[in-house]
Amino acid sequence: MAAMGELEQAVMDILWNRPEPLSVRDVHELLARDRDLAYTTVMTVLDRLAKKKLVVRNLDGRAWLYRPAKSRAAQIAAEMLDLLGRLNPDERREVLDRIAPASR
């Protein structure tokens, strides 16, 4: 699983913080409050997130509506499991002892 870039993370944060699916225009308007981004840049980021299966999109008339494929917690858990899977058993045990020493 590839790590998300800063802009991808910002887009995902917007989608996770909204209960309803959002259009490219909606996401662009929310991102444009803090940064100067082209509409097409946001469209490309959402398309890439869809290809990575991080968002689900549905056509509503002529506009795509986007929503997260998983909750934020489920996504982070999947990323952690992916990272832990790259380690040998001793390394995995060391990591788990460092992040959850009381539960072991």
Image (cartoon, helix red, strand yellow):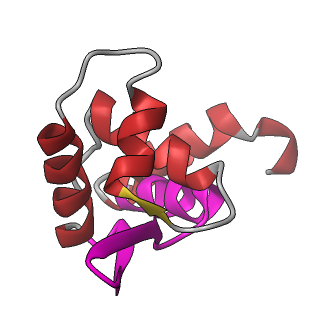
Residue 100 in picture, x, y percent from top left: 74, 41
- Tell me which residue sits at (53%, 70%) in the image: 70
**Range shown magenta:** 53-82
Residue reaching furthest front?
61
**Hey, which quadrant is residue 29 in on the image?**
top left
Please identify the residue farthest to the right as the structure is shown. Answer: 102
Q: Quadrant of the N terminus?
A: bottom left
**How many numbered marks are there?**
0
Position of 41 compared to 54: left or right?
Answer: left
Q: 99 or 62: which is nearer to us?
A: 62
**Frontmost residue, 86 versus 51:** 51
Q: Where is residue 74? Give x, y as percent.
A: 59, 65
User: Seen in the image, is 94 located left or right of residue 99?
Assistant: left
Residue 73 location (% of width, % of height): 64, 57
Query: What's the residue at 28%, 55% (across, down)?
Result: 86
Answer whether residue 76 is magenta in the image.
yes
22 in relation to 31, above or below: below
Residue at the image point whose x is 44% and y is 49% from the top = 26
- 28 relative to 21 in the view: left or right: left
In the displayed structure, would residue 96 be above or below residue 18?
above
Is residue 78 found inside the magenta-colored segment of the image?
yes
Q: Give me the residue at 48% from left, 34% from top.
A: 30
Task: Determine which quarter of the picture holds residue 72.
Answer: bottom right
Q: Where residue 36 appears, x then y in whole percent?
A: 26, 16
In-front residue for pair 52/22:
22
